[in-house]
Image (tube, grey):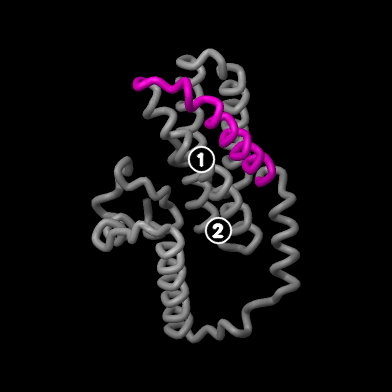
Amino acid sequence: MGTAFYNACDYWCDKCDHAAECPVCEKTHKKGRSGDFIEDVKESLHEALTMLHDMAEEFHIDLAGIADGDEEDRISRVVDTDPLVILSHDFALKAHKSLGRMRPFVTKEMREFFEDLEWYHSLVAVKTHRAVRSLYEGFTEDAVDSAEVARKSAHKCITALTRLGEGCPGVKEECSILGRTAERIRVELDRVVPGGGENRP
C-alpha cells in the first residue's frame, strides 16, 4: 500500500488485507465512532485541519498565501468537466438507482455482492474525481493512490454486478450495462493516471 494510507484507503477495514499495518484502521477501531455521522465528520475534519496546520508549521509553509481563488475555480471547472470524472459520476448515480430496484430481490446468497456494490459504487466516483484533480494539481502520488482505490472499487463493482445480474434476472441488463461502464472507467484510469494499473486486481 505504500505510506499514504489515507489516500489509498477504501475505509472497509473488515475486508482489507492491510488492516494490521494501517493507521487509519487502528485509529478508527481504537477510538471508535460516536454514532452521530455529522459529529464524526466534524471531528475528522478538525483533526485533518490540525494536522495540516502542524505540517505547514513544520515545513515553514504560509497557508494564508496559498489559496488562489481564481486558480481553484479554474481547476474545479476543468476537473468537473473531465470526461472520466463525468463517466464515473454517472456510473455512481445509475448504480445507486439500480441498488434501490435490486434491494427487494436480493437473496441471502446475493447479499455479499449487493453490499459490495452498495459500498464501492460511490468510491469509484469519489476516488476518480480525486485522482483527476490531483493530476491537475501536480500531486502525482496522491493521483496514483486514489486511482488505485477507484480501480479496485470498479473491479469490486464489476464482480458484484455480474453476480447480481445472474441472481436477479429482472435487473440483468442494467447490471451488464453498469459493469461495462465500470470496466471503461478502469481502462481510462490506466490510460490517464501515470503508474496506474500496476497492482490492479
User: Which residue type does callout 2 highlight?
Assistant: Thr
The residue identified by callout 1 is: 151
Q: Is residue 55 left or right of residue 97?
A: left
Give me the residue at 70% from left, 53% from top. Answer: 80
**Label 2: few (<14), some (14–19) or many (≥20) C-alpha neighbours in 10 Å:** some
Q: Is residue 84 left or right of residue 5?
A: right
**Label 1: few (<14), some (14–19) or many (≥20) C-alpha neighbours in 10 Å:** many
- 199 drawn magenta: no
Give the x, y percent position of residue 163. Answer: 45, 20
Give residue 140's mark. Answer: 2
| Quarter of the view holding residue 63 | bottom right
Of badges 2 and 1, nearer the viewer stands 1
| Quarter of the view holding residue 180 | top right
Q: Nearer the viewer, residue 56 or 162?
A: 162
Give the x, y percent position of residue 28. Answer: 31, 58
| Quarter of the view holding residue 43 | bottom left
Callout count = 2
Give the x, y percent position of residue 35. Answer: 35, 57
